Amino acid sequence: MKRYLLLNLVLFTAFVAQAQSERKFVREGNKMYEAGLKDTAKLDTVSFGKAEVAYRRALELKPDDKQWQFNLADALYKQKKADESAKEFENIAEKAPLPADKAKAFHNMGNSFLVQKKLDESIATYKKALRIAPNDPQTKYNLAYAMKMKKEDDKKKQQNKDKDKDKDKDKKDKDKDKNKDQNKDQNKDQNKDQNKDQNKDQDKKNQDQNKDQQKDQQQQPQQNKISKQNAEQMLQALENDEKQTQEKVKKAQALKAEKRNVEKNW
């Protein structure tokens, strides 16, 4: 029952028109509109569409008739053309001479915003209607309903916002961990490369040292050989000196012996 009240629109029936053609279109429009309301189990957009056509024809003959404009806006609303009906109700509210007509236009305009889930607009429009007709029970109910939907919608948006925030946090944490792992791997690779370079340098150093040792070892026998030759030469020189010395000694002894013999003979 409340759902019916929420979507219930105030319908102005057309009064007797001045011309026969106008009355014909109005009667046709009212008939189609009422036919559309009969089956509450489904929305008869065909009947409401025919009502729209009839009301538009009537307005072509009498464009300033507020009642027919109101019925046209209702027919648009029933066809779920909520955006078009909101514009029609707004136009009626601006031009309606009577406060009651303004309040009814704002009420239906609020319904048009509500079915589009334009909650802020519907709440503001219901409040306009209540400023004019503060005791209207339907408008009060629809305002309360719209405010409840707004609260639930805000809560849902906040939850989604919190979820997105948590997702962003999780993503940042994952990125942080990923960067940490990447830095760890990078440092590991750098240390590995550094150790590799150090080992390579050490190996090269060791190889150079080994080469120097081998070179020294190769040179050492040669040096020892040269020293042996020098020693032989030195030994030969000593032997030569020794022979010369012995010859000098022999000559000296021979001279002494000869001298002794001479002295003895005298």
Image: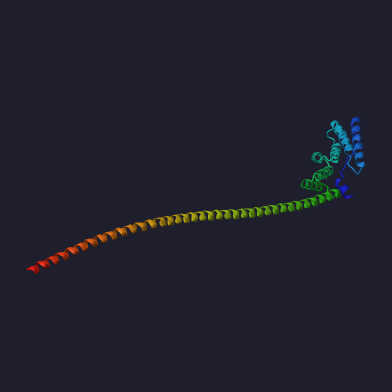
Question: Quadrant of residue 87 in the image?
Answer: top right
Please name the residue shown 84% across and 31% down the image.
Answer: 60
Residue 66 position, x and y percent, is 84, 37
Please name the residue shown 86% across and 50% down the image.
Answer: 137
Instruction: Name the quarter where the C terminus is drawn.
Output: bottom left
Q: Nearer the viewer, residue 25 or 242?
A: 242
Q: Nearer the viewer, residue 240 or 112?
A: 240
Please name the residue shown 19% across and 64% down the image.
Answer: 250
Residue 32 to residue 154: above or below: above
User: Colour mode?
Assistant: rainbow
Residue 127 position, x and y percent, is 79, 48
Residue 29 to residue 104: above or below: above
Residue 105 position, x and y percent, is 83, 42
Q: Nearer the viewer, residue 201 or 143?
A: 201
Residue that extends furthest to the left in the rendered view of this protein: 266
Residue 10 to residue 16: above or below: below
Across the whole image, how many numbered discs are drawn on residues?
Answer: 0
Residue that extends furthest to the front in the rendered view of this protein: 265
Question: Quadrant of residue 232 in the image?
Answer: bottom left
Residue 220 position, x and y percent, is 39, 57
Locate residue 151 relative to residue 228 in the image: left or right.
Answer: right
